Image: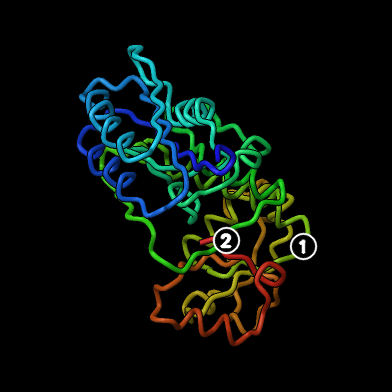
Amino acid sequence: MRHHTRSIILPVHNAEPWLDECLRSVLQQDFEGTMELSVFNDASKDKSGAIIEKWRVKLEDSGVHVIIGGHDSLSPRGVGYSKNQAVAQSSGSYLCFLDSVFTANGPTVIMPTWFCSRAWFSHVGPFDEGGQGVPEDLLFFYEHLRKGGGVVRVDQSLLLYRYHPRAATHSVLETTIWTHRVRFLEEQALPRWAAFTIWNAGKQGRRLYRSLTAASQRKVVAFCDVDENKIRKGFYCHEDSQERPKPRIPILHFRAARPPFVICVKLDLTGGAFEDNLRSLHLQEGQDFLHFS
C-alpha cells in the first residue's frame, strides 16, 4: 500500500490561531486511500507545537500517519526550507500541499491546490530557500513550466483559502512578483515573436513596456486600447529612454492593431466588454495572445 500513500505537506510557523481548523480539515478529508501528514514546525514561538501534538493522536486514531519535524532556533528558516524539510521526511508517492499560515502570492494556481507526484517534485524542485520575501511557490511553478509541466483544472470547489494580514505572502513585495513575471515572459514567450502589441495603453501596459529589456522594447510595435482619449493622443513617448530620438509607440484602437498581443487588462472588470472584444477577433491563446494582467 505504501506506494499509493498521499503525503500532506504542512509547513508551520506561529500558526496557533488557524492550526486547529487546518488540522481538522485533514481529519475531515474524504480521500479513502492511505494518507500521511508531514508537519515541519519552523521555530514557532506560540502554542503551535502543542496543538500539533494534540491532533497527532486524533489523526493517528483515524488512520492518518503523522510525521513531525522542526527546529526551535531563534528565527524561522522560511517557507521554502520548511516545505523541503516536510517533503524530505515524508514517504508517500504523491504530495499534496497544505499551508497553515504561509499562503501563495503570484500564480493564479495557488499553492494549496498543488498535487503532484514525488518523482515530479524531485525533477523540478526543491523550493528556493531564500526565506522571507522570496516567492518560492511562483519560482517553483515557473520551473515546472520550463520542464514541460502542465496544469489540470478541476471544476469543483475543493479548497477554502484564507487570506489574512499576518500571512507570509505579505512579506513578498509586489515588485518582486512583477519582476519575476516580466523575466519569465521575456524568457518563455517573447523570443517566439519578432514584434508584438501591448493591449492596454494605460498604467499597466506602460509599466510593462518600461519593465522590458531594451531588446524586448524594440519589438513593441504598438499599444492598443478602446479609450478614445488615449487613442486620440496618437502615441506613447518613453521619456526615460536613453535612445535619441526617444521611442514613440503608436496607440491604436484594438481593431486596428495586429496580433500577437500581450494583454495587460484584468479579466472580469468591464462587465464582459473586454472579453467580448477579444473573442470577436477569433484569436488563439498562446499563439496570438497572452494574458499578463
Residue at image location 54% in from the left, 62% down from the top: 205
Q: Is residue 27 above or below residue 193?
A: above
Q: Amino acid at mark 2?
A: Val
Mark 1: give few (<14), some (14-19) or many (20+) Cα within 10 Å.
Answer: few
Residue 13: x and y in percent read 32, 28
Left or right of residue 110, residue 247 in this image: right
Does residue 130 appear in the picture of this structure?
A: no
Q: Position of residue 182 (x, y in %)?
A: 60, 49
Residue shown at 70% from the left, 74% from the top: 259
> In this rendering, does residue 165 appear at all?
yes
Q: Considering only vertical position in the picture, is 55 above or below 287?
A: above
Mark positioned earlier in the residue sequence (1 or 2): 2
Residue at left offset 62%, top offset 35%: 125
Q: As displayed, is residue 186 above or below residue 66?
A: below
| Residue under label 2 | 152
**Coloration mode:** rainbow
* Residue 193 numbered mark, or none: 1
- Mark 2, secondary structure of its residue: loop
Residue 281, x across and y down, in percent: 63, 84
* Quarter where residue 45 is shown: top left
Q: Give, as a three-letter code, the residue at label 1.
A: Trp
For residue 36, which numbered disc appears in the image? none
Residue 30 x/y as whole percent:
37, 55
Task: Please name the residue shown 60% across and 56% down the image.
Answer: 209
Using the image as rendered, state which of residue 273 and residue 25 is in the foreground: 25
